[in-house]
Image (cartoon, helix red, strand yellow):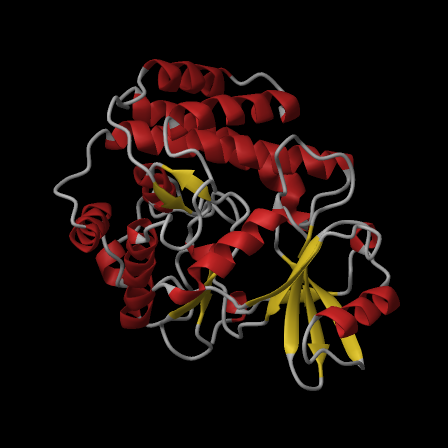
Amino acid sequence: MSTESQPRLVEMLPQHRLDEARLFAYLAGHVEGFAEPATIRQFQGGQSNPTYLIETAARNYVLRKKPPGTLLPSAHQIDREFRIQSALAATDVPVAPMLHYCTDAAVIGTEFYVMGHVAGRVFHDVMMPGLAPEERGAIHRQIFETIAALHKVDYNAVGLTGFGRPDHYVARQIERWTKQYEASKTEDFAPMTDLIAWLRANIPERDESAIVHGDFRLGNMMIHPTEPRIVAVLDWELSTIGHPLADLAYCCMSYHLPPGSGPAMAGYQGVDLAELGLMSEAEALELYCRRTGRERIDNWRFFMGFSLFRSAAIVEGVYARALAGNAADQRAHRMHDVFLQVAKTGWNIVRGD
Protein backbone atom coordinates (compact mmCIF):
# COMPACT_ATOMS: atom_id res chain seq x y z
CA MET A 1 0.00 0.00 0.00
CA SER A 2 1.39 3.39 -0.97
CA THR A 3 2.42 5.64 1.91
CA GLU A 4 0.61 8.50 0.17
CA SER A 5 -2.68 6.78 0.95
CA GLN A 6 -2.26 6.72 4.73
CA PRO A 7 -4.22 9.36 6.69
CA ARG A 8 -1.53 11.51 8.31
CA LEU A 9 -1.54 11.99 12.07
CA VAL A 10 0.54 14.55 13.97
CA GLU A 11 0.68 15.94 17.48
CA MET A 12 -1.86 18.71 17.90
CA LEU A 13 -0.78 21.91 16.17
CA PRO A 14 -0.18 24.79 18.60
CA GLN A 15 -3.19 26.78 17.37
CA HIS A 16 -5.46 23.73 17.68
CA ARG A 17 -4.52 22.47 21.14
CA LEU A 18 -7.38 21.72 23.51
CA ASP A 19 -7.93 20.67 27.12
CA GLU A 20 -7.65 16.88 26.85
CA ALA A 21 -8.64 16.15 30.46
CA ARG A 22 -11.79 18.24 30.21
CA LEU A 23 -12.68 16.74 26.82
CA PHE A 24 -12.25 13.13 27.96
CA ALA A 25 -14.28 13.74 31.10
CA TYR A 26 -17.07 15.23 28.98
CA LEU A 27 -17.04 12.33 26.51
CA ALA A 28 -17.20 9.78 29.33
CA GLY A 29 -20.49 11.36 30.37
CA HIS A 30 -21.99 11.84 26.91
CA VAL A 31 -20.73 9.13 24.51
CA GLU A 32 -21.87 5.60 25.32
CA GLY A 33 -18.94 3.26 25.92
CA PHE A 34 -16.26 5.97 26.04
CA ALA A 35 -13.73 5.30 28.79
CA GLU A 36 -10.23 6.44 29.61
CA PRO A 37 -7.32 6.01 29.20
CA ALA A 38 -7.46 7.86 25.91
CA THR A 39 -5.01 9.62 23.60
CA ILE A 40 -5.61 12.28 20.97
CA ARG A 41 -3.73 13.27 17.82
CA GLN A 42 -4.61 15.56 14.93
CA PHE A 43 -5.17 14.59 11.30
CA GLN A 44 -2.83 16.62 9.10
CA GLY A 45 -4.50 17.49 5.80
CA GLY A 46 -7.86 19.07 6.63
CA GLN A 47 -7.93 22.61 5.28
CA SER A 48 -10.97 23.78 7.19
CA ASN A 49 -12.28 22.18 10.37
CA PRO A 50 -9.57 20.70 12.63
CA THR A 51 -10.06 16.96 12.95
CA TYR A 52 -8.66 14.63 15.63
CA LEU A 53 -8.31 10.90 16.25
CA ILE A 54 -9.14 9.79 19.80
CA GLU A 55 -7.93 6.29 20.65
CA THR A 56 -9.16 4.18 23.56
CA ALA A 57 -8.76 0.52 24.46
CA ALA A 58 -12.24 -0.39 23.23
CA ARG A 59 -12.87 1.92 20.28
CA ASN A 60 -11.45 4.78 18.25
CA TYR A 61 -13.30 8.04 17.62
CA VAL A 62 -12.96 11.07 15.36
CA LEU A 63 -13.67 14.61 16.62
CA ARG A 64 -14.29 17.60 14.34
CA LYS A 65 -14.47 21.16 15.61
CA LYS A 66 -14.59 24.69 14.33
CA PRO A 67 -11.21 26.39 13.82
CA PRO A 68 -10.05 29.16 16.16
CA GLY A 69 -10.01 32.83 15.27
CA THR A 70 -12.38 35.11 13.37
CA LEU A 71 -14.39 33.11 10.83
CA LEU A 72 -16.08 34.15 7.61
CA PRO A 73 -19.88 34.46 7.74
CA SER A 74 -21.80 31.16 7.40
CA ALA A 75 -18.56 29.12 7.33
CA HIS A 76 -17.63 26.06 9.44
CA GLN A 77 -21.18 25.02 10.30
CA ILE A 78 -20.25 21.64 11.71
CA ASP A 79 -23.77 21.13 13.04
CA ARG A 80 -24.83 20.67 9.41
CA GLU A 81 -22.17 18.00 8.92
CA PHE A 82 -23.54 16.09 11.88
CA ARG A 83 -27.15 16.41 10.74
CA ILE A 84 -26.66 15.28 7.17
CA GLN A 85 -24.46 12.31 7.99
CA SER A 86 -27.01 11.21 10.59
CA ALA A 87 -29.74 11.46 7.94
CA LEU A 88 -27.77 9.47 5.36
CA ALA A 89 -26.99 6.58 7.71
CA ALA A 90 -29.75 4.38 6.30
CA THR A 91 -29.14 5.18 2.61
CA ASP A 92 -26.79 3.79 -0.05
CA VAL A 93 -24.32 6.63 0.66
CA PRO A 94 -21.58 5.37 3.00
CA VAL A 95 -20.96 7.67 5.99
CA ALA A 96 -19.28 7.39 9.38
CA PRO A 97 -21.56 6.71 12.40
CA MET A 98 -22.51 9.93 14.19
CA LEU A 99 -22.29 9.62 17.99
CA HIS A 100 -22.63 13.03 19.70
CA TYR A 101 -22.85 16.76 19.01
CA CYS A 102 -21.66 19.23 21.66
CA THR A 103 -23.04 22.77 21.61
CA ASP A 104 -21.14 23.81 24.76
CA ALA A 105 -18.14 25.81 23.51
CA ALA A 106 -16.72 25.86 27.05
CA VAL A 107 -15.60 22.22 26.78
CA ILE A 108 -12.81 22.75 24.21
CA GLY A 109 -13.36 26.30 23.01
CA THR A 110 -15.73 25.63 20.09
CA GLU A 111 -18.67 23.41 19.25
CA PHE A 112 -17.68 19.92 18.07
CA TYR A 113 -19.00 16.50 17.20
CA VAL A 114 -17.77 12.95 17.65
CA MET A 115 -18.19 10.07 15.23
CA GLY A 116 -17.01 6.49 15.07
CA HIS A 117 -13.62 6.04 13.41
CA VAL A 118 -13.80 4.30 10.03
CA ALA A 119 -10.50 2.62 9.18
CA GLY A 120 -9.20 2.96 5.67
CA ARG A 121 -7.06 4.83 3.17
CA VAL A 122 -7.33 8.36 1.84
CA PHE A 123 -5.84 9.20 -1.55
CA HIS A 124 -5.07 12.90 -1.91
CA ASP A 125 -3.44 12.32 -5.30
CA VAL A 126 -6.02 11.55 -8.01
CA MET A 127 -3.44 9.30 -9.69
CA MET A 128 -3.74 6.91 -6.71
CA PRO A 129 -0.08 5.89 -6.79
CA GLY A 130 0.76 2.33 -5.87
CA LEU A 131 -2.50 0.81 -7.12
CA ALA A 132 -2.98 -1.55 -10.04
CA PRO A 133 -5.09 -0.14 -12.90
CA GLU A 134 -8.05 -2.41 -12.07
CA GLU A 135 -8.07 -1.23 -8.42
CA ARG A 136 -7.71 2.40 -9.44
CA GLY A 137 -10.52 2.02 -11.94
CA ALA A 138 -12.83 0.35 -9.42
CA ILE A 139 -12.41 3.23 -6.96
CA HIS A 140 -12.85 5.81 -9.73
CA ARG A 141 -16.06 4.15 -10.86
CA GLN A 142 -17.37 4.02 -7.29
CA ILE A 143 -16.88 7.78 -6.91
CA PHE A 144 -19.42 8.40 -9.67
CA GLU A 145 -21.73 5.63 -8.51
CA THR A 146 -21.70 7.17 -5.03
CA ILE A 147 -22.39 10.73 -6.14
CA ALA A 148 -25.25 9.37 -8.24
CA ALA A 149 -26.60 7.54 -5.18
CA LEU A 150 -26.40 10.76 -3.16
CA HIS A 151 -28.28 12.78 -5.76
CA LYS A 152 -31.02 10.13 -5.88
CA VAL A 153 -31.75 10.33 -2.13
CA ASP A 154 -35.16 11.89 -1.37
CA TYR A 155 -34.03 14.60 1.05
CA ASN A 156 -37.53 15.10 2.44
CA ALA A 157 -37.89 11.38 3.16
CA VAL A 158 -34.65 11.27 5.20
CA GLY A 159 -35.55 14.27 7.33
CA LEU A 160 -33.62 16.99 5.52
CA THR A 161 -36.52 19.28 4.68
CA GLY A 162 -35.26 22.79 5.27
CA PHE A 163 -31.59 21.74 5.10
CA GLY A 164 -31.26 24.17 2.22
CA ARG A 165 -33.41 26.15 -0.17
CA PRO A 166 -34.36 24.00 -3.18
CA ASP A 167 -34.47 26.89 -5.64
CA HIS A 168 -31.93 29.20 -7.31
CA TYR A 169 -28.98 27.39 -5.76
CA VAL A 170 -26.48 28.40 -8.43
CA ALA A 171 -27.36 32.09 -8.37
CA ARG A 172 -27.17 32.18 -4.59
CA GLN A 173 -23.86 30.29 -4.57
CA ILE A 174 -22.32 32.68 -7.07
CA GLU A 175 -23.20 35.60 -4.82
CA ARG A 176 -22.16 33.81 -1.63
CA TRP A 177 -18.75 32.77 -2.90
CA THR A 178 -18.16 36.09 -4.59
CA LYS A 179 -18.64 37.75 -1.19
CA GLN A 180 -16.38 35.18 0.48
CA TYR A 181 -13.77 35.73 -2.20
CA GLU A 182 -13.95 39.51 -1.87
CA ALA A 183 -13.55 39.15 1.90
CA SER A 184 -10.45 37.00 1.64
CA LYS A 185 -8.72 37.85 -1.66
CA THR A 186 -5.09 38.90 -1.47
CA GLU A 187 -4.85 40.53 -4.92
CA ASP A 188 -7.03 41.52 -7.87
CA PHE A 189 -6.95 38.79 -10.54
CA ALA A 190 -8.65 39.63 -13.85
CA PRO A 191 -9.58 36.03 -14.87
CA MET A 192 -11.47 35.56 -11.59
CA THR A 193 -13.26 38.89 -12.02
CA ASP A 194 -14.19 38.00 -15.62
CA LEU A 195 -15.32 34.50 -14.64
CA ILE A 196 -17.66 35.88 -11.98
CA ALA A 197 -19.20 38.33 -14.48
CA TRP A 198 -19.72 35.58 -17.10
CA LEU A 199 -21.36 33.22 -14.61
CA ARG A 200 -23.75 35.90 -13.39
CA ALA A 201 -24.84 36.56 -16.98
CA ASN A 202 -25.26 32.91 -18.04
CA ILE A 203 -27.17 31.08 -15.28
CA PRO A 204 -29.21 28.23 -16.86
CA GLU A 205 -32.96 28.67 -16.78
CA ARG A 206 -33.73 25.08 -15.74
CA ASP A 207 -33.42 24.50 -12.00
CA GLU A 208 -33.03 21.20 -10.09
CA SER A 209 -32.55 20.23 -6.46
CA ALA A 210 -30.90 17.31 -4.65
CA ILE A 211 -28.60 16.74 -1.70
CA VAL A 212 -25.20 18.07 -2.74
CA HIS A 213 -21.98 17.38 -0.87
CA GLY A 214 -20.18 20.50 -2.05
CA ASP A 215 -16.66 19.01 -1.94
CA PHE A 216 -17.15 15.61 -3.56
CA ARG A 217 -13.70 14.37 -4.64
CA LEU A 218 -11.33 11.48 -4.11
CA GLY A 219 -9.55 13.15 -1.17
CA ASN A 220 -12.83 13.11 0.77
CA MET A 221 -13.41 9.38 0.29
CA MET A 222 -12.31 6.81 2.87
CA ILE A 223 -11.28 3.71 0.96
CA HIS A 224 -11.38 0.23 2.54
CA PRO A 225 -7.96 -0.77 4.00
CA THR A 226 -7.42 -3.57 1.46
CA GLU A 227 -10.32 -3.46 -1.03
CA PRO A 228 -11.03 -0.90 -3.80
CA ARG A 229 -14.24 0.18 -2.10
CA ILE A 230 -15.49 3.45 -0.59
CA VAL A 231 -16.43 2.91 3.06
CA ALA A 232 -17.24 6.51 4.01
CA VAL A 233 -17.70 9.90 2.36
CA LEU A 234 -16.02 12.54 4.54
CA ASP A 235 -16.12 16.32 5.07
CA TRP A 236 -19.76 17.40 4.68
CA GLU A 237 -19.22 21.01 5.74
CA LEU A 238 -20.46 22.47 2.43
CA SER A 239 -23.42 20.13 2.00
CA THR A 240 -26.87 21.54 1.33
CA ILE A 241 -29.84 21.18 -1.00
CA GLY A 242 -28.67 22.38 -4.39
CA HIS A 243 -28.20 21.69 -8.07
CA PRO A 244 -26.80 18.18 -8.64
CA LEU A 245 -24.87 19.18 -11.78
CA ALA A 246 -22.86 21.71 -9.77
CA ASP A 247 -21.82 18.87 -7.44
CA LEU A 248 -21.04 16.60 -10.39
CA ALA A 249 -18.97 19.25 -12.15
CA TYR A 250 -16.90 19.77 -9.02
CA CYS A 251 -16.25 16.03 -8.96
CA CYS A 252 -15.04 16.26 -12.60
CA MET A 253 -12.67 19.22 -12.21
CA SER A 254 -9.62 16.96 -12.31
CA TYR A 255 -10.29 16.34 -16.01
CA HIS A 256 -9.55 20.02 -16.65
CA LEU A 257 -6.48 20.61 -14.46
CA PRO A 258 -2.85 19.56 -14.90
CA PRO A 259 -1.11 17.03 -12.65
CA GLY A 260 0.45 18.48 -9.54
CA SER A 261 -1.82 21.54 -9.52
CA GLY A 262 -2.42 21.37 -5.79
CA PRO A 263 -3.01 18.80 -3.03
CA ALA A 264 -6.78 18.79 -3.62
CA MET A 265 -6.87 19.87 -7.24
CA ALA A 266 -4.34 17.60 -8.99
CA GLY A 267 -5.57 16.83 -12.48
CA TYR A 268 -5.55 14.45 -15.42
CA GLN A 269 -4.65 16.79 -18.28
CA GLY A 270 -2.11 15.13 -20.56
CA VAL A 271 -2.44 11.77 -18.77
CA ASP A 272 -3.31 8.45 -20.48
CA LEU A 273 -6.45 7.70 -18.47
CA ALA A 274 -7.10 4.29 -20.02
CA GLU A 275 -3.60 3.11 -19.18
CA LEU A 276 -4.22 4.04 -15.55
CA GLY A 277 -7.57 2.25 -15.53
CA LEU A 278 -9.54 5.51 -15.26
CA MET A 279 -12.69 6.58 -17.09
CA SER A 280 -12.73 9.54 -19.43
CA GLU A 281 -14.99 12.44 -18.51
CA ALA A 282 -17.50 11.32 -21.15
CA GLU A 283 -17.56 7.80 -19.66
CA ALA A 284 -17.97 9.18 -16.14
CA LEU A 285 -20.87 11.37 -17.21
CA GLU A 286 -22.51 8.47 -19.05
CA LEU A 287 -22.26 6.33 -15.92
CA TYR A 288 -23.77 9.11 -13.82
CA CYS A 289 -26.64 9.55 -16.27
CA ARG A 290 -27.34 5.84 -16.29
CA ARG A 291 -27.35 5.63 -12.49
CA THR A 292 -29.61 8.67 -12.03
CA GLY A 293 -31.94 8.05 -14.99
CA ARG A 294 -30.90 11.30 -16.67
CA GLU A 295 -31.10 11.44 -20.47
CA ARG A 296 -28.32 13.99 -20.92
CA ILE A 297 -26.37 16.78 -19.23
CA ASP A 298 -27.00 20.32 -20.43
CA ASN A 299 -24.93 23.47 -19.80
CA TRP A 300 -21.82 21.48 -18.83
CA ARG A 301 -19.48 24.39 -19.66
CA PHE A 302 -21.40 26.63 -17.24
CA PHE A 303 -21.36 24.11 -14.40
CA MET A 304 -17.67 23.37 -14.87
CA GLY A 305 -16.86 27.09 -14.88
CA PHE A 306 -19.03 27.56 -11.80
CA SER A 307 -17.27 24.74 -9.94
CA LEU A 308 -13.83 26.09 -10.79
CA PHE A 309 -14.89 29.57 -9.66
CA ARG A 310 -16.20 28.27 -6.36
CA SER A 311 -13.09 26.15 -5.82
CA ALA A 312 -10.87 29.13 -6.54
CA ALA A 313 -12.77 31.17 -3.94
CA ILE A 314 -12.39 28.38 -1.38
CA VAL A 315 -8.69 27.97 -2.06
CA GLU A 316 -8.05 31.70 -1.72
CA GLY A 317 -9.88 31.57 1.61
CA VAL A 318 -7.55 28.79 2.77
CA TYR A 319 -4.59 30.94 1.78
CA ALA A 320 -6.01 33.94 3.63
CA ARG A 321 -6.46 31.85 6.79
CA ALA A 322 -2.86 30.66 6.44
CA LEU A 323 -1.70 34.26 6.38
CA ALA A 324 -3.77 34.87 9.51
CA GLY A 325 -2.17 31.84 11.17
CA ASN A 326 -5.18 29.61 11.71
CA ALA A 327 -5.38 27.27 8.69
CA ALA A 328 -5.46 23.60 9.65
CA ASP A 329 -2.92 22.45 7.06
CA GLN A 330 0.73 23.41 6.93
CA ARG A 331 0.59 23.28 3.12
CA ALA A 332 -1.98 26.07 2.98
CA HIS A 333 0.62 28.74 2.23
CA ARG A 334 1.10 27.18 -1.23
CA MET A 335 -2.57 27.63 -2.04
CA HIS A 336 -2.41 31.03 -3.71
CA ASP A 337 -0.71 29.53 -6.78
CA VAL A 338 -3.49 26.93 -6.90
CA PHE A 339 -6.07 29.72 -6.78
CA LEU A 340 -4.48 31.42 -9.79
CA GLN A 341 -4.42 28.15 -11.77
CA VAL A 342 -8.03 27.19 -10.98
CA ALA A 343 -9.50 30.63 -11.64
CA LYS A 344 -7.67 30.95 -14.96
CA THR A 345 -8.82 27.46 -16.02
CA GLY A 346 -12.45 28.33 -15.21
CA TRP A 347 -12.29 31.51 -17.26
CA ASN A 348 -10.71 29.67 -20.22
CA ILE A 349 -13.43 26.99 -20.15
CA VAL A 350 -16.42 29.34 -20.12
CA ARG A 351 -15.06 31.45 -22.98
CA GLY A 352 -14.40 28.32 -25.02
CA ASP A 353 -10.59 28.22 -25.00
In percent of the image, x 61 and y 34: which residue is there?
A: 74
Relative to 73, say whether 241 is above or below.
below
Does residue 76 appear anywhere in the picture? Answer: yes
Relative to 303, say whether 43 is above or below.
below
Q: How many marks?
A: 0
Q: Position of residue 210 (x, y in %)?
A: 34, 43
Relative to 162, say whether 287 is above or below.
below
Relative to 332, say whether 148 is above or below.
below
Does residue 125 appear anywhere in the picture? Answer: no
Is residue 67 found left or right of 346 in the rendered image? Answer: right
Near-viewer residue (50 or 294): 294
Quarter of the figure with residue 93: bottom left
In percent of the image, x 36 and y 53: which residue is there?
A: 157
In percent of the image, x 64 and y 36: which residue is there?
A: 319
Q: Position of residue 235 (x, y in %)?
A: 53, 53
Near-viewer residue (268 or 76): 76
Near-viewer residue (264 or 42): 42
Quarter of the figure with residue 18: bottom right
Q: Position of residue 242 (x, y in %)?
A: 39, 37
